[in-house]
Every structure is written in structure tokens, then in C-alpha cells.
Image (spheres, rainbow, N blue to C red):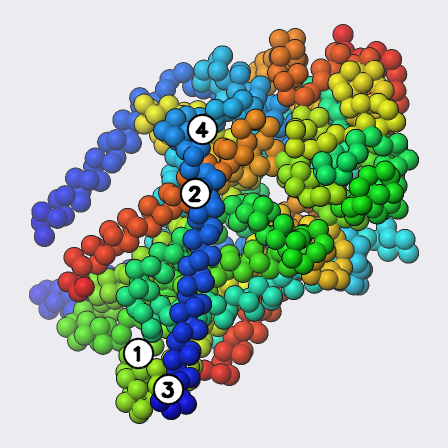
Amino acid sequence: MQDQKLAKQLFKKSKTARYERFGRFLCLCALLLIMAIVIGIILFIATKGMSTFLKDHISMKDFFTGTLWNPGTKTPDGHAAVGALPMILGSFLVTILAAVISTPFAIGTAVYMTEISPKRGAKILQPVTELLVGIPSVVYGFIGLSVVVPFVRNVFGGSGFGILSGTFVLFVMILPTIVSMTVDSLKSVPTYYRQASLALGATKWQTIWKVVLRAATPGILTAVVFGMARAFGEALAVQMVIGNASLMPHNLISPASTLTSVLTAGMGNTVMGSMQNDALWSLALVLLVMSLLFNLLVHFIGRKGAFSK
Amino acid sequence: MQKRRMIKWLLVAVVILAGIGSYTTRSKQATNQQSITAVGSTALQPLVEAASEEYSAEHSGIFINVQGGGSGTGLSQIESGAVQMGNSDLFAQEKAGINPQKLVDHKIAVVGVTPIVNKKVGIHRLTSKQLIAIFTGKVKNWRQVGGKNLPITLINRTQGSGTRVTFEEYGLNGRESAVAQEQDSSGTVRQIVSSTPGAISYVSFGYVNKAVQPITINGIKPTERNVMDNDWKIWSYEHIYTNGQPTGLTKKFLHYLQNDHIQKTLFNKLGYISVKDMRYQRTWQGKISKGSGVE
Amino acid sequence: MNRVQKQSQIAIIVLKAIAGFVVLILAFLIGYIFITGLPNVSWKFLTSPAKAFSSGGGIGVQLFNSFYLLILAMLISLPIALGASIYLNEYAKDNWFTSMIRTSIEILSSLPSVVVGLFGFLLFVVHYNFGFSIISGALTLTIFNLPLLTRNIEESLASVADDQRQGGLGLGLSKYETIIHIVVPAALPGIISGVILCSGRVFGEAAALIYTAGQSAPALNFGDWNPFNIDSPLSPLRPAETLAVHIWKINSEGIMPDLTQVSSGSAAVLVLAILIFNLSARYIGRKVFEKMTSMN
């Protein structure tokens, strides 16, 4: 009797082990919940987006190569006017330009914050970056409208609405995201890397450039991806300064449009289930696929250029 | 250790008691605390919001929830029964994808649409031929129609916007405007026109302010009087659609909107025209006949 | 001084200039917002309800709604993000499946907020019939917030040195206990800065809320704190226009005569609120960190 009870006790998991299993299970549930949401949204956009091609019988060629966007009507040469090319190019250009301009400034600021003046960095620049993130996109949009657009108009010509204005606005918007995440990855480079480099006689800048930045490259690239993701998905602010003209962007200072601006502006005027509405969801699908491609690209680059830890 | 655990359980007990307490003492006048939702046209939104503000001030506990989203959203939401009122600038028959069978139309107001230009352009009248030429892109500089030497910056509302459909149908005589910059709200359009030299667009009367210049067409000024006489042809009805005949709070609110007190005070202030003051009426296909259509 | 040292000095000066430029941009932005906005802010402005077509409206209700939504959204998303990051960082194996999961979370973060808002509209407002309400808004904000928060927490957890974990295990704690009692507290500064970053974004978010929490704000009875009444501030089923949505709305369709003043005033209040929130969250975080780990 005693032996059996003892055997049972010995074979049962200890309280700590049960706690461990429970805790691990909780965390797994949280992760599964997030995955369910992600998959749900992706499936939703995919089915709605694909129904343009499958249910409304629009050809993919018209969608990707056409240059006139007016769903429900036909172009002069008889195709359905669902050309998304101007918007795809617009989104692409504005995101890449904003990222290209923003990254050097962001990395420079982050390096200053962690390597050169950590004290001043923490006291001044950290609150500064966090504050920049908090300014809502609507406010950026209106400042863009009242400051950036006249500036571009007076300096570069044109009406002031266009890809250049969009780039300037996005540059300021994604800067804090990239800075903050770069700072995190720079901070997680172990101190002994820097000490070893300095001990070998390298200057501060050489240490930063050849050791610290190289070690933090995967983190920095992730920061850039997040920044580009934010630029890509930004709708309200870009909408106000880019002009929303569904024309092929032929220069930087004429009104153009992005996938997000057309999507936001048009969603309210269409009816769920109609062809115009499905066409807008196809734009969303394109957004999704393009961001996936961006993502994979950046990780591929990251894997090639980084130190292995 | 024991004390910590006790405190934890005490907190849980307090929260549960508070929850039960709030639930049992919640306002028993549940019938007085009603709310209905109106969704749709942004052109009608200011009016319905203002009216709901006045209505809620007079009847406490009632709340009329007004959302925007565009005429398309309004019509699809009322069709599916998700909301009680669907605001629309267009007749339900005019919108693709909507089945107008069960929807009951309540014409709440008439709204006039006028072209507006930036003040620097220097003109305040055009002929309809000139207007069409500008909006179809044939005329590219203000010089060509008697204004200053400024390139024309065309600003449209988005496809499917009720204001745009009205403007193209009755202002451009059915012609489609050239592909140009688009904005999705009247407020943004007004802001852009007021700050961009050479800009031209169109908004409903209620949005015209001192910052922009309204345009007289063919000698007819954009005033409420001219709309009532159908001399100014660019106007449309503002509809509130209900799914079947309205009941309860929805019915009361619609009555409130259609009664004379509101129509004479609020409408005037906000730039809307009462349907009862119209000398002519128009069907969704565009046929004009005499009489306001409302008793 | 030789060549590399000169290079180093030049590089450092360039870096200082860049950092200075960034501070300048912010100073300009904040200066513009405050100079155009603060003159319109008064106690009356901060506490009275908005007016639809006459001047003199305030933002009291919208301000409360913004905070309430923020707290609710954070309360819901923080545990989920924490749990998921812990699993990803500590338990998941380092294989392609895990990278795929990470990638899909990153993709979610690049969706335009409008799409998340519409998804929330169709799911919470229409399908689950919550209507335009705080709960719809909070749940949508959670979806919107999760990727960035998860990423941030993951990075902070990863930056905790392995020695800490080994120490914990060496003392006989289980893996989960080590994580909860040692790793998470050590990662607290990073987690707090992640929470602040995300709160900033959530507070200023408009597009996701336009279709979920709504564009209207019933007048609130601040004397009634019973969550089950519709005009109680705590009721989660009421529509709740936030400050950011209000700014968007009055600029798009506002017809009140003092439009620009209300808009710039609201923007100033918004930015000010975020500033205060950031500073106090930092302060509290530092205190909590010191208490929990006796490091400083």
C-alpha cells in the first residue's frame, strides 16, 4: 500500500515541472493566437483579392501592366481599366527613396547615441525619437500639406504634390523606427568586441565601421525592413501630399499615387462584393505580396553580409 | 508568502463584487438609453451630426451615432441591415452592386455643388463650355480663359464620390474629367484649393468659405435660390435610406430631420436646402418635373 | 596625427552633425505644432465636448477615449506579445519553421493600418456585432500593435546575456521560472522602451480606428462609473472617437468656423500627452527595474 503510494508520488511530475509545462503551454498559446490572426488576415486579403481575377474575370495582364485605373469602365482600347502599374511604381519609388535617404541618417544617429555620447544619447535623443514616433500620421500629413508641399513647389517646381513630397514626409516618419531598432541591435553587440578592437590599435571609427556595425548588421537590416514596412503601409500622411493621380509617375514632382492612397481614398465609395471593391482588395493583396518580397530580400542580404556569432 | 496569497485573493474578490454590484445597479431605464447608427455619405455627415447633437440635447440618454465611410459604405451597410440609417448622395439605383428593393428612400435635403478656384487665379465666372474644357484637360492654363498666367491644377474627388458623380453629370453634362489628382474628402479639397495657386475643384455649398472663390457659371451664381429654381443645375438629393419602413427611434429622428424647425434653422446655417423649398424635382434617371415632390 | 585617426575624427564630427540634424527636425516639428496649437488650448478646451457646427467645441471626451483605448489595447496585447516572444526566443528551435513564423509576423506589420481597420470592421463591428465600439477599436489596435511589440520584446529578451539563464538553471530553477523571475526583469528596460514606442504609435493611430471605434463620441457622464451604462466613460460598447480620429475628421469634413484652431489645438494636446506619457513611463519603468533586479 505504502509502496504503491510512494511509486505514484515518484512518477508524478513535480510541482515545478508542472508549472514549467503550464507556463510553456501559455506562451505557446499566445504564439498560436498571433499566428491565427496573421493567417486569418492573409487568407482574407488573398480570397478577396483573388476574386477580382476569378470571380470578376479581370485578366492579370490588364491589372499589372495597364496604366489606367478606373474600375468599372473600359480603356480606349477595350481593356478593363484596372491598371495598377502606376500605383505599384509609386509605392515602390516612394518607399525605396525614403528608405535610402533615411537609413544613413538613422544609422548615424544611432551610432552617435550608443558609441559616441551614450549619456547625451540617452538623455536627449531617446526621448526625441520616441516622441517622433508618437506624432500621428494625420499630423504629419497636415504639416506635409502646409510646409513640405509649398517648399517643394517653390524649390523644385510643379504643383508641389508628388513623389518627392511623399519621400520627404516618409523620411521623417520612418526615421525614429529605424533609429530605435538600430540602437537596440547596437547595444546588444557585446562590449568585448569593441574592447578587443581598440586593444588591437583600431581607432574609434574603425571599430565602429568594421566591427560593431558588421556585428549588428542583421539587426540593422531588420530595422530597415521595419522602416520600409512602415513607409509602404503608410496611407493617411502620404495621401495628402502625393496627389493621388492615377498616372504613371514620370517625374518626382508631378502628382502620383501609391497603392495605399488609392486604397484608402476609394474604399468608402465602393460596395462590398462589387467589382470596384474587389479591385481595391487586389491592391491590398499586391501590398502584402510586395512586402513579403521586400522582407525575404533583406533577410537574404543580411545572411550574406553578417558575422556569424 | 501566505500574506501575499491572501492579498491576491482579496483583490480578486473585490473585483468580482464590484462587477456584480455594477451589473445589478446599472441604469434600469435601458429603454431610455438607446442608440442608432447612421453610416455613409460624408457630404451629409455634418448635417446629420449637427441634428443629432441637437436631438440628444433635447432627449437625454438617446444617442445617434453618425459615421462617415462614403455613400458606398452607407448603402451596403443599410442593405445588410448592420445599421439603421444609410446616408447617400446618390439614389440607391445609381450605385452598382446594391439591390434597392427593400430600401426606403427618405429625401432629407438638397445640396448644391459649386466649382471653386484658388483666389490667385483672378476669375470668378466661366461658361459651361469653358468649365468642361478645363476639367477634360483641353485647357491647361488660366490665361486661356481670361485669368492670370498660371497652370491649371485640377483636383477631383475620388471615383464613386457622390459629389463627383453629381458634378460630372450636371456640371460637365455627363463628360468624364481628365485623370488628375484626387482627394477623398471635401475638407482636404478645400484646403488644397485655398493654398495651391491655380487650383480648381468642386465642393458642396456648405464647404465654401472665404478662403476659396466660388464660380458663377453662364451668369448664374451658386446660391440656394438658384438651386430651388433649377437655374443652377448642379445639385443632388441627400438620401437617408432605411431597410424597410423605419420604426422607433429611427422614425422619430427622421421626422425630426424633416420637420420645419430644423429645416429652417440648421439647414440654412450649414448650407443645405430643404426639399420642400425646391420648385422642381428630379428622378434618378435625371428627369425634371415641376413641384417639390414633397407635400 | 596619422591618416586613420584623422578619418576617425572627421567621421565623429559627421555623426554629431547627423544627430544634431535629427534633433533639429524634431525641434522644428514640435515647435510648429506647439506654436500653432498651444494658444488654442485652455482648460475649457480640454474638458468640454466637441461641437459639430458651432465654434467653441472642445476635446474632453476624445482625450479620455484616446487614453482609455490605449490602456485597454496595451492590456490585451502585452501578455500575448510577451508570451509569444518568450516562446519564440527561449523555446522554439532555430529552424526554418521559426523563421517563417517571424517573417509572417513582420509582414503583418507592413499592412497599411487601413487594411487592419477594415478587417477589424468586418470582423468585430459587423460579424461579431460589437458595433462601433471601444472593444472593436481595442481589439483592432491589438492586431495592429502585436507585430512591433513582439519584435521589440524578442530583441530585449535576446540581449539578456546567457550567463543569467545559466545562473538560474544552475540554482535549480526550471526554465520557465528562470525566464519569469530572471530574464524578463533583466530585459525590462528594453521591454519598457518597446511598450513606449508602440504606445506612441497606438495613441496617434487614426486609420485603424475610423472604421472600428467610430467617428462619433457620445457625451459622457463622468459621474457614472458603472461600466454597463452607455454613457459611462468605462462602457466598452460605446462608440469612441479618439483625438487622432477627431483631427482627421474635422480636417476632412469639418464645417465649424474655428476649424483650424480646434485642429491645431488637438494636435498640440496629442503631442503633449505623448510626451508626458513617455517621460512618466520611463520614470516608472526605471523604478520598477531597480526594485526588481537591484541593478542600476
* Residue toward you, C11 or A254: C11
Marks 4, 3 in one chain: yes
Instruction: Say what amino acid the circle numbered 2 marks.
Output: Phe
* Residue toward you, C206 or C125: C206
User: In the image, which is nearer the foreground, mark 2 or mark 3?
Assistant: 3
Marks 2, 4 in one chain: yes
* Residue toward you, B118 or A235: B118
Instruction: Say what amino acid the circle numbered 4 marks.
Output: Gly
Pointers 1 and 2 in contact (C-beta within 8 Å): no
| Percent coordinates x, y for residue C203 in the rendering | 43, 45
Which labelled disc corresponds to residue C58?
A: 4
Marks 1, 2 in one chain: no
Query: Residue shown at 65%/64% (left/top)?
Result: A93
Pointers 3 and 1 in contact (C-beta within 8 Å): no
| Percent coordinates x, y for residue A220 in the rendering | 45, 72
What residue is pinned by disc 1?
A: A190
What residue is pinned by disc 3?
A: C5
Q: Chain of mark 3?
A: C
What residue is pinned by disc 2?
A: C34
User: In the image, which is nearer the foreground, mark 4 or mark 3?
Assistant: 3
- Is B125 positioned to the left or the right of B56 in the image? right
- Is A155 positioned to the left or the right of C139 in the image? right
Location of residue B218 by image quarter: top right
Calculate the distance from the C-alpha at mark 2 to the C-alpha at mark 3.
Answer: 43 Å
Label 1, secondary structure: give it: loop
Q: Chain of mark 2?
A: C
